[in-house]
Image (spheres, rainbow, N blue to C red):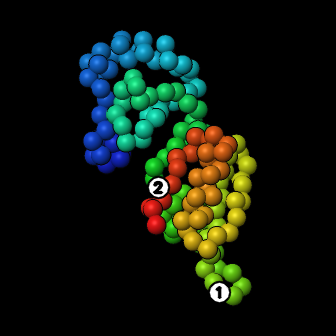
Amino acid sequence: KSYKNYGGRGIVMCDKWKGDFVEFYNWCLSNGYKKYLEIDRINNDGNYEPSNCRFITHSINNQNSRLLRKNNTSGYRGVGKKTDKFRKKRWTSTITSGGIVYKLGVYETAEEAAQAYNDFVINNKTHHPLNIIPSP
């Protein structure tokens, strides 16, 4: 069902783990595995291998998604379109962290709003993925 998001993108499990479950199991035990944690790839485009994996909570793992919702109008995480009372389009930036919704402001461009989102992620050291903003 999710092949297009993993194998279809060339993401594989390293031979060391694929060929030896005990090797994978021992790595898990020595790298923070707990029953309530999930395995996560640090680089979302990288493979499942010791240097690219860690264990994190489900809520943090949900924040670490490369996928945007189908109704996303901006192409950026946390950025939405807003029309003000003068019918001028503006862009809002919001983020949810620790169960709290932060309204980061209203901006002239989607890129400015995306940068506000990125700044929040960096300044607060959250696990949200950053927006990729093209250089002007």
Labelled disc at residue 70: none
Picture coordinates of residue 98, whole percent (x, y): 70, 42
Picture coordinates of residue 128, whole percent (x, y): 57, 45
Circle 1 — which element? Answer: loop
Q: Is residue 124 visible?
A: yes
* Residue at figure coordinates x 63%, y 40% from the top left: 125
Q: Is residue 109 left or right of residue 98?
A: left
Picture coordinates of residue 9, whole percent (x, y): 30, 46
* Residue at figure coordinates x 46%, y 66% from the top left: 136
Taking the view exactly as shown, the residue that stands out farthest to the front is: 136
Q: Quadrant of residue 91?
A: bottom right
> Callout 1, which amino acid?
Arg
Q: Nearer the viewer, residue 75 or 38?
A: 75
Circle 2 — which element? Answer: loop
Q: Nearer the N terminus, badge 2 or badge 1?
A: 1
Q: Is residue 59 left or right of residue 132?
A: right
Q: Nearer the viewer, residue 90 or 18?
A: 90
Q: Nearer the viewer, residue 4 or 103?
A: 103
- Reading the image, the residue beneath label 2 is 132
